[in-house]
Amino acid sequence: MFTTAIVRPPGPGFADGLTEANLGPPDLDRALEQHAAYCRALERCGLTLHVLPPDPAFPDSTFVEDTAFLRKDRAILTRPGAPSRQGEVEQIRKPLSTYFESVAGIKPPGTLDAGDICDTGETVFVGLSRRTNEEGIRQLSALLSREAEVVSIDIRGIPSLLHLKSGLSSVGSGRLTVSHRLEGITFPKRFDLVQVADHEEYAANNLLINQFLLLPSGFPQLESVLSGLGYQILLVDMSEFQKMDGGLSCLSLRF
Ligand code: CIR
């Protein structure tokens, strides 16, 4: 069970963040409304929110998920691959230290964005991406060696896939939602794959929290498949975050 989430609303410079989405500039007021609705959905899942103040110095800092990987009783601070985002990590250390006794970290020359980490429990898939390098994955594997198998997936040659989780989510019980962009990847047979239609690929990033599955709104095909599988779905409008290459999961750190 998750009990808590760290979130950070977008700040005034939100539109200055990194993006290759080509969907036009985001509307900050709308992003703030969407963020507030996202927070309400997390609360509906039973989570208590720890809300950090927006930080104008870091336009991408609303995407808190990328700065840390959290598991049971341990936290691992990442080292984002984009230099403009590396300063976000120190700001997450303090709040995490209030919840976790052990806070480890990825060290140079390793880089790791937690958006590249898809945790299924015993197996942790990690994207070798334009943000996460081999050394970052090696350090993560060493830190997790006693508790999980780390499987690296090379996504560097896949266009328009920023992070592994932009195209892959674990929705519990060994089930994964998978974007067509990952079709060349072979997953271990024990996983049950739910393929996400090409025109709905953004929804391959979703979030299972306790009894609910948070899904971006506007993707009816996947919504119908997942509700048919018995998931209780909460829809969240993510349009302004999508414009900044952000997936639904990246707006929170859950534990
Ligand atoms: C970036 O390019 O770093 C941000 N604009 C978006 C990060 C999204 N992170 C995620 O989906 N985990």
Image (spheres, helix red, strand yellow):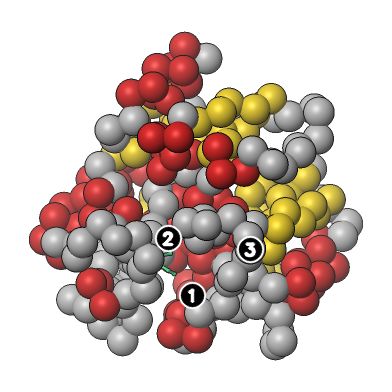
The answer to which of marks 1 and 2 sits earlier in the sequence is: 2
Q: Mark 2 to mark 3: distance in Å?
A: 29 Å
Q: Residues within 10 Å of mark 2 (few under 14, many from 20)?
A: many
Q: Is residue 47 above or below residue 26?
A: above
Q: Is residue 63 above or below residue 72?
A: below
Which of the numbered marks, if any, corresponds to residue 6?
Answer: 2
Residue placed most toward the observer, 103 or 123: 123
The answer to which of marks 2 and 3 sits earlier in the sequence is: 2
* Helix, strand or loop for disc 2: strand
Question: Can I make out residue 16 in this image?
Answer: yes
- The amino acid pointed to by label 3 is Arg
* Residue tagged 1: 92
Residue at position x 59%, y 70% from top? 130
Q: Mark 1 to mark 3: distance in Å?
A: 27 Å
- 191 left or right of 221? right
Which of the numbered marks, if any, corresponds to residue 156?
Answer: 3
Q: Which numbered disc, 2 or 3, marks the residue closer to the eye? A: 3
The answer to which of marks 1 and 3 sits earlier in the sequence is: 1
Mark 1 and mark 2 in contact? Answer it, CB < 8 Å.
Answer: yes
Residue sticking out furthest to the top: 228
Residue at position x 71%, y 87% from top? 109
Residue at position x 26%, y 77% from top? 16
